Image: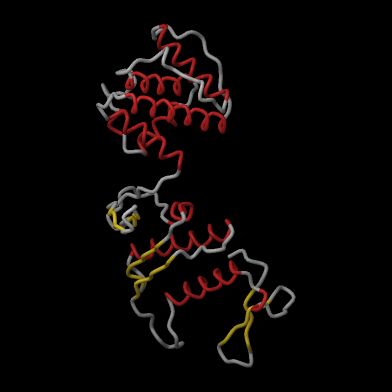
Amino acid sequence: MGFHRFRLSNADEFGGSYRIVRENGTPAFDSLSEGEKTFISFAYYWESLFGSEVASGLPEDVVAVIDDPISSLDSDALFMIAAYIRDAANLALKGNTNLRQLIVFTHNTQFHHEAAYTTERNSKERRYFRLVKDLTEYTTVRDDKNESKIRGSYALLWHSVVEAARTEDESDLVRVGVFNIVRRILEGYFKTIGNVKDFDRIETVSPAEERMISQFHIWANSGSHTIADDLDQTIDTGRTKDFLRLFKQFFDIQGHGAHFDMMVAASGGENLLKTDQLFSRL
């Protein structure tokens, strides 16, 4: 598993037992950190899923329940445990071991993304639930069916773009919200990816639309902004969808149209990319 701070050795005085020792052979049990204790407990649990207490025994069918196994772990250990959980999920799906079902609980978003990762979208054998606590102090269960609704901040911004593209609400609240979401996407993505290139005047857009695209360019270059920044002079109520269309066009101009399509599709907006839809291309 890549751990070098401790290892298991045979405890000869106790048949079939082991002790935890450091690299130099000294006992490590009393000096284990909380993260190391968590990890060794998980390793023992993992082995117990597929084995028997007696050498001649056959493993029984099991339903494995894992409750947030990453307490006090660093990022390396979190990644390894998530990888083992993905392996366990695949074994349960294949049905060729004694592991019949795997149930995992977590409140850690990063661990959720690592452990639940799969290349199979909307797999019928996978099910996602959210426990939602509200101000009434009651906890409710949300059934997300076969698609996880847990997303990071960046993915949530794109999800909001897709929702805005679908809504017919053209209120000031929606309009201002969309502007700030687009601003955050442009600042975050292009400041991370870099290589924001200048462009010549666009002949296919009106002067007002060109001003909007130029504003996108400023956001992508400048980074942080202030409350004094405003777009009221370039966009009117009722133009939200035009604003989003130009947002897509800016990604195309910068040569990152594929990323735009990927994020829209990942947010459930595949239909918006089709011919004659808001984000379609000629």
Q: Position of residue 279 (x, y in %)?
A: 33, 24
| Depth order, front residue of 42/221 | 221
Q: Which is nearer the eye, 163 or 94?
A: 163
Q: Quadrant of residue 91?
A: bottom left
For this view, does 197 lie left or right of residue 138? right
**Residue 161, position as x, y percentages in the image:** 36, 31
* Residue found 43% across the figure and 60% down from its top: 106
Residue 258, relative to residue 28: is it above or below?
A: above
Res 207 quadrant in image: top left
Percent across and percent down for residue 22 are 70, 74
Residue 153 pos. (x, y %): 45, 41
Instruction: Work out whether 276 lies above or below 122.
Output: above
243 relative to 95, above or below: above
The quadrant in which the C terminus is found is top left
Q: Quadrant of residue 271?
A: top left
Q: Name the residue at the front extreme.
A: 136
Q: Which residue is drawn at the image coordinates 41% and 16% (left, top)?
A: 232
